[in-house]
Amino acid sequence: MTIPRDERPRTRSDLARDQAWAISVGGIGIVLFTALLAFTWYFAATLLLIFTGMLLGLGLNALVNALGRRVHLPHTVRLAIVCVALALLLAGIAYLGGATIAEQASVLSKTIKSQITNVRSLLENHGIDTSFFDLGNAASGSSDTTSPDATPAPAAPSRGPLPGAGAL
């Protein structure tokens, strides 16, 4: 009498075949996941643009359908109304917020300049070369030779134990 395959005990070759199948499927899965990850990394900007477009389309469609429940106009007219309303809303936000943003940008610029001065003086007091801070000022300082009351640059402080960039 023969024993059906399901009822007989598993042999060593059956286990080896199952393990080989599991290892190969796992390897294929790892390779596919790596390929998908590389594809996503390489085309991240494009995929983000596609996803953003889909979200924008869904949002516009939802607004058009909500307007359609209240006003019975053709779909294209409702879409035009929604697009114009959103454009006006965005323009209003930019207009009203523009002055505030410009004011905050000037305050931020002044704060950054004062903090760079503070950091530069702290580094100079500790004997660290700060000549890299002069890169932006060198180009603008050379063209501004017409100011009669220009004060001479202060003498460089002693560098202490650390050599300057020119010593290398």
Image (cartoon, helix red, strand yellow):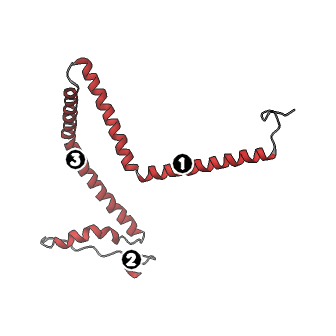
Which residue was labeled with disc 1? 33
Which residue was labeled with disc 2? 165
Q: Which mark is residue 103?
A: 3
Q: CA distance from mark 2 to mark 3?
A: 38 Å
Labelled pair 2, 3 in contact (Cβ < 8 Å): no
**Quarter of the figure that contains the C terminus:** bottom left
Binning the other alpha carbons within 10 Å of mark 3 as few (below 14), some (14 to 19) or many (20 upward) gives few
**Quarter of the figure that contains the N terminus:** top right
Q: Nearer the viewer, residue 91 or 109?
A: 91
Labelled pair 3, 1 in contact (Cβ < 8 Å): no
Query: Which quarter of the figure has residue 3?
Result: top right
Percent position of residue 104, x then y: 25, 47
**Above or below 145: residue 27:** above
Q: Amino acid at mark 2?
A: Ala
Secondary element type, mark 3? helix
Q: Residue visible at 35% across and 65% down?
A: 120
Q: Amino acid at mark 3?
A: Glu
Left or right, 27 with respect to 84, comes to: right
Q: Amino acid at mark 1?
A: Phe
Binning the other alpha carbons within 10 Å of mark 1 as few (below 14), some (14 to 19) or many (20 upward) gives few
Secondary element type, mark 1? helix
Q: Residue visible at 83% across and 38% down?
A: 9
Q: Which mark is residue 112?
A: none
Percent position of residue 93, x then y: 22, 37
Percent position of residue 71, x then y: 21, 19
Query: Which quarter of the figure has residue 72?
Result: top left
Q: Earlier in the sequence, mark 1 or mark 2?
A: 1
Q: CA distance from mark 3 to mark 1?
A: 49 Å
Check the image and name the residue furthest to the right: 1
